[in-house]
Amino acid sequence: MSRMDRETIKQALKVYFIMGSTNCLASDPGKILKEAINGGITLFQFREKGLNALAGKEKRSLAMRLQSICKEHGIPFIINDDIELAIELEADGVHIGQEDEPAEAVRAKIGDRILGVSVHSLEEAEAAQRAGADYFGIGPVFATVTKEDAKPERGTVLIEMLREKGFQVPIVGIGGIHAGNAASVIEAGADGVSVITAISTAKDAAAAAAELKKSVGV
Ligand SMILES: Cc1ncc(COP(=O)(O)OP(=O)(O)O)c(N)n1
Ligand SMILES: Cc1nc(C(=O)O)sc1CCOP(=O)(O)O
Ligand SMILES: [Mg+2]
């Protein structure tokens, strides 16, 4: 596997769906993922986190099921936080934050797989770029209740600042994003939007994904 080029990553970030079993209310994660793919998502992150999150064999088994759905439809499969699982399953990439394993160490472990890093400041963006991040996740752009330890809503200031300073690293906005506000995140300079609730709890996940796609101009 060779390192994915920036333009391919930018295209993949357009409608980036994140989900774990705890985001699915009473519905089956596999069913939601299939619907989201039918609606046009471009990238998927398995994020098994929060109260009642699966662990061990159950987590691995759900990851494998969702990865197989992604493979069938040509959607890259990213794993949140769990680098060992990502390597074991030969996932397409990992996403880490500032409280996770350092980005340099993760890059050394995963080789050419996609590395996404959450950044909240210019300094964090510079460090993540040096460590070889393939994209930055920046949020929360809007208020969110999905991530228990989310920072306060930040708007699009950092996205704008990084673009003004000439950063070319692909950027995805995250936090409280839906079809009604996604365009403002792209206008600020992001390449795509990342969502959990807007798709995972929608009555019609396919329609929600399709609306997001329209909002980001795909
Ligand atoms: C695309 C994307 N952006 C940001 C995050 C958040 O990562 P992190 O800060 O490590 O928080 P957790 O998701 O691990 O709770 C993300 N997962 N994806
Ligand atoms: C996983 C995550 N990371 C965030 C960050 O700010 O880094 S906000 C967030 C939750 C996004 O969920 P929703 O689309 O339901 O708001
Ligand atoms: Mg993390």
Image: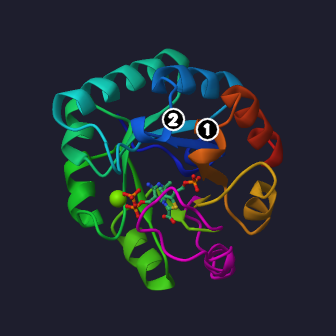
Residue 19, percent across and down? 48, 40
- Residue at the spot of label 1: 201
Q: Residue drawn 33% across and 26% down?
A: 62
Q: Is residue 32 above or below residue 126?
A: above
Image coords of residue 214 (percent x, y): 82, 41
Q: Which residues are magenta?
A: 142-171
- Asked if residue 197 is positioned above or below residue 165 in the image, the reply reads above
Q: Which residue is denoted by mark 2 in the rendering?
A: 25
Q: Are marks 2 and 1 in contact (CB under 8 Å)?
A: yes
Q: Is residue 99 left or right of residue 42?
A: left
Magenta segment main secondary structure: loop
Q: Residue at x 47, y 22 (%)?
A: 30
The quadrant of the picture showing ligand 1 is: bottom left
Q: Which sits in the foreground, 109 or 185?
A: 185
Expressed as whole percent of the image width and height from the top left, the position of residue 179 reads: 78, 48
Q: Secondary structure at mark 1?
A: loop
Q: Is residue 50 left or right of residue 40?
A: left
Question: How far apart, in angstroms, are the residues tagged by discs 2 and 1?
Answer: 7 Å
Please tell me whether residue 210 is drawn above or below residue 136 in the rendered image. above
